[in-house]
Every structure is written in C-alpha cells, then in structure tokens.
Image: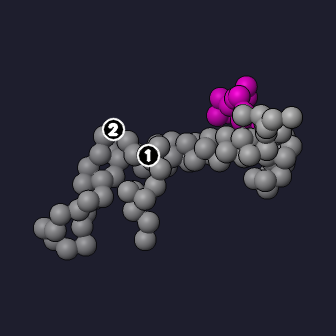
Amino acid sequence: MITLDELPNAFREDQEVEAPSAQAGAPSPTRIPVGPMKDIVRQHTENLEKELILRALQETGGNVTKAARRLEISRKSLQNKMKDLGLRDAPAERAPE
C-alpha cells in the first residue's frame, strides 16, 4: 500500500488530520487532507496532470506533439489539457541545438 509519505509534496495539504490506524490507539505517521473528497481528488489529479505534462514537455524539449505521444494522448487533447490547467504558455526547457 502506498502512503501519503511516499507521494510528492504536491499531494499534501496544509489542513491535515491523522489517518485512522490499523490498531486502536496506535500512533499513525500518515496524515490525510481535510475537506470534501471530490475536491481533494480533483486538486491532486490536476497537480499530477501538471507534473506529468511539464515533465513530458521538458523531456521533449517543449515539443507538444512528441510530449503527447509520450503521454499517449492526442496532440489536441494535450493542448486542451494545458489550456485547462493554465499551462498554455508554460515554458519548457529546450534542448541545446
């Protein structure tokens, strides 16, 4: 099982509560965000999508077509996702030419 401690920092929220432990009264090192689950899941999904898109763009020198292929989505879907996530003009590190 993956714990929150094993996920990137972007998955942790400022508001946290202790997760219930397997044994009653045992201390739990894992903390979970507080709030409506759908909002938490949406935010974490957006953060993960941003990270994956930015990484693909970086690895392809900013080439959207190649990044889309790497992510196994269409170029148009990637462009729409970038627009939705506010990454439309995201600077990608270009490979030296």
Q: What residue do we see at 86% from left, 43% from top?
A: 65
Inspect this view and state whether residue 39 appears.
yes
Which quadrant, please, contains the C terminus? top right
Q: Quadrant of residue 94?
A: top right
Image coordinates of residue 21 in percent, x first then y, are 24, 67
Q: Is residue 88 left or right of 76 when viewed as pictured?
A: left
In the rendered structure, which amino acid carries the disc numbered 1?
Asn
Query: If you read the primary sequence from the N terminus, does the residue marked by circle 1 or circle 2 appear first?
Result: 1
Nearer the viewer's eye, disc 1 or disc 2? 1
Label 2 belongs to which residue? 14
Label 1 belongs to which residue? 9
Reply yes or no: does residue 78 show up in magenta: no
Q: What residue do we see at 33% from left, 38% from top?
A: 14
Q: What residue do we see at 16% from left, 68% from top?
A: 26
What residue span does the magenta drawing correspond to?
79-92
In the rendered structure, which amino acid carries the disc numbered 2?
Asp
Q: Residue furthest top?
A: 89
Label 1 element class: helix
Label 2 element class: loop
Q: Could you tell me if the residues under marks 1 and 2 are in contact, i.e. CB atoms within 8 Å?
A: no
Image coordinates of residue 1 in percent, x first then y, are 43, 71
Image coordinates of residue 45 in percent, x first then y, are 56, 47
Residue in front for this viewpoint, 35 or 13: 13
Image coordinates of residue 55 in percent, x first then y, are 67, 45
